Image (tube, grey):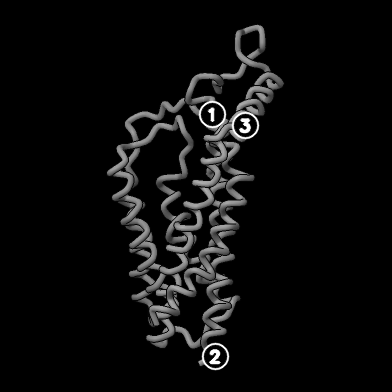
């Protein structure tokens, strides 16, 4: 069984990790590089006329493009992309192993009769809800230069939110009767009723429009990776069931 869990995790996790890495390099890394210009003071988000001393739209575009080219051309840029790619593979393999364990437990307990790639997508959607969408309702993804509460408080709230959302989703999905559904919904809502930790005042130097775009793209990338990973995991476990 352990061999199946690890094999399923590698199969689904590597596929999802490659997809996530490609999408991040395309959609979110350019936003991070631009945010670094705000963090270092090269750009400001109080845009005015060029004669006021602030860069025009054209000058801003040129500055961003130059920063991206310098980053990609430098050795540190290549190393950073490789680290991003490697980290994505490790993270998504870990996610896939957790997903494989959950599917295996559900099959073993008779909570679900079978699994295929379509049902796997549903499992992936639940994983996205627990690990990304629910935590993002209180602590959205952050760019460099954003203001935030102390790291320990955010980690505690994020972990509690993931665990409670996963447990609540399981009660809703597999519970029989009204009370498991009610309990599941209560568990999902609990961390948001308590509230995520935030700084006393928001004063980040990064453009709020850029931050909003980053949040949307980050959630889209993670959703795509989870759905793809769920489909691969469902395909793997369905073949395992057919092979006996």
Number of callouts: 3
Q: Is residue 217 above or below residue 169?
A: above
Q: In terms of image quadrants, where is residue 33? A: top right
**Nearest to the observer: residue 86 or residue 212:** 86
Q: In terms of image quadrants, where is residue 159? A: bottom left
Q: Is residue 90 above or below residue 48?
A: below
What distance separates the C-alpha of mark 3 from that of mark 1?
18 Å
What residue does disc 1 label? 207
Marked residue nearer the N-terminal end (3 or 1): 3
Marked residue nearer the N-terminal end (3 or 2): 3
**Nearest to the observer: residue 21 or residue 200:** 21
Label 2 crowd bin: few (<14), some (14–19), many (20+), radius 10 Å? few
Q: Please, what secondary structure does the residue beneath circle 3 have?
A: helix
What distance separates the C-alpha of mark 1 from that of mark 2?
54 Å
- Which residue is most to the front? 75
Marked residue nearer the N-terminal end (1 or 2): 1
List x then y, in percent, for residue 43: 56, 21
- Which residue is most to the bottom? 244
Name the residue: 60% across, 19% down: 47
1 and 2 marks in contact (CB < 8 Å): no
What residue does disc 3 label? 68
What residue does disc 2 label? 243
What distance separates the C-alpha of mark 3 from that of mark 2?
49 Å
3 and 1 marks in contact (CB < 8 Å): no
List x then y, in percent, for residue 177: 38, 81
């Amino acid at each position: 069984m352990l061999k199946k869990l690890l094999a399923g995790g590698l199969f689904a996790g590597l596929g999802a990790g490659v997809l996530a890495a490609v999408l991040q390099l395309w959609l979110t890394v350019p936003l991070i590089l631009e945010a670094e210009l705000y963090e270092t003071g090269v750009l400001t988000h109080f845009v005015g006329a060029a004669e006021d001393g602030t860069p025009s739209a054209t000058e801003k575009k040129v500055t961003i493009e130059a920063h991206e080219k310098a980053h990609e051309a430098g050795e540190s840029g290549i190393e950073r992309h490789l680290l991003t790619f490697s980290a994505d593979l490790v993270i998504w393999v870990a996610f896939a192993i957790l997903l494989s364990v959950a599917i295996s437990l559900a099959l073993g307990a008779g909570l679900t009769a079978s699994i295929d790639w379509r049902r796997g997508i549903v499992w992936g959607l639940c994983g996205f809800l627990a690990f990304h969408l629910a935590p993002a309702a209180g602590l959205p993804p952050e760019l460099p230069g954003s203001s935030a509460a102390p790291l320990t408080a955010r980690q505690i709230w994020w972990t509690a939110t993931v665990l409670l959302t996963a447990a609540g989703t399981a009660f809703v999905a597999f519970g029989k009767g009204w009370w498991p559904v009610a309990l599941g919904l209560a568990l999902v809502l609990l961390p948001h009723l308590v509230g995520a930790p935030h700084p006393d005042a928001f004063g980040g130097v990064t453009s709020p429009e850029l931050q909003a775009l980053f949040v949307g793209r980050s959630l889209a990338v993670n959703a795509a990776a989870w759905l793809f990973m769920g489909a691969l995991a469902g395909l793997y476990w369905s073949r395992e069931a057919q092979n006996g």
